[in-house]
Image: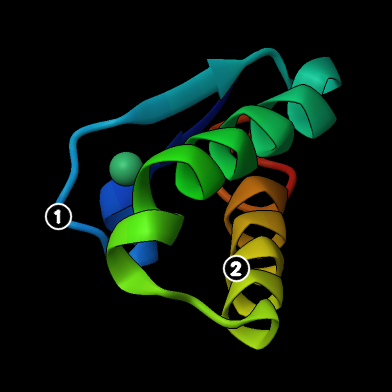
Amino acid sequence: MKIIKCRDLGFNCDFMATGSAAEADGVKQKMMDHILEKHLPEKEMSDEDIEDIASRIEILLSRGCGCGAL
Ligand SMILES: [Zn+2]
């Protein structure tokens, strides 16, 4: 199970994207879609900021799935 919270990325927002481990790419995509749709207009983020968020999503998704395989 993969879960990523908007809050973990520094937004004051309760959105979460979830999916099975096999769907990690889909979870990332859901999160990016949400950020681009909801937070891009309010934060005026640069391409660099977006890339930074994308890499943080990768890190968050690659760790701590609870299966013990760190
Ligand atoms: Zn959000």
48 up-or-down from 8: above or below: below
Circle 2: element type = helix
- Within 10 angstroms of label 2, few (less than 14), some, or many (20 or more) residues? some
Circle 1: element type = loop
Q: Residues under labels 2 and 1: Cα distance?
A: 16 Å
Q: Identify the residue at horizontal 14%, vertical 55% (top origin).
A: 12
Left or right relative to 50: residue 43: left
12 up-or-down from 49: above or below: above
Q: Which residue is mark 2?
A: 56
Q: Identify the residue at horizontal 80%, vertical 18% (top origin).
A: 23
Instruction: Say if disc 1 is inside 8 Å of ligand 1.
Output: no
Q: Position of residue 69 (x, y in %)?
A: 74, 44
- Give whichever of 45, 3 is nearer the camera: 45
The nearer-to-camera label among 2 and 1 is 1
Q: Are marks 2 and 1 in contact (CB under 8 Å)?
A: no
Q: Identify the residue at horizontal 48%, vertical 76% (top origin).
A: 45
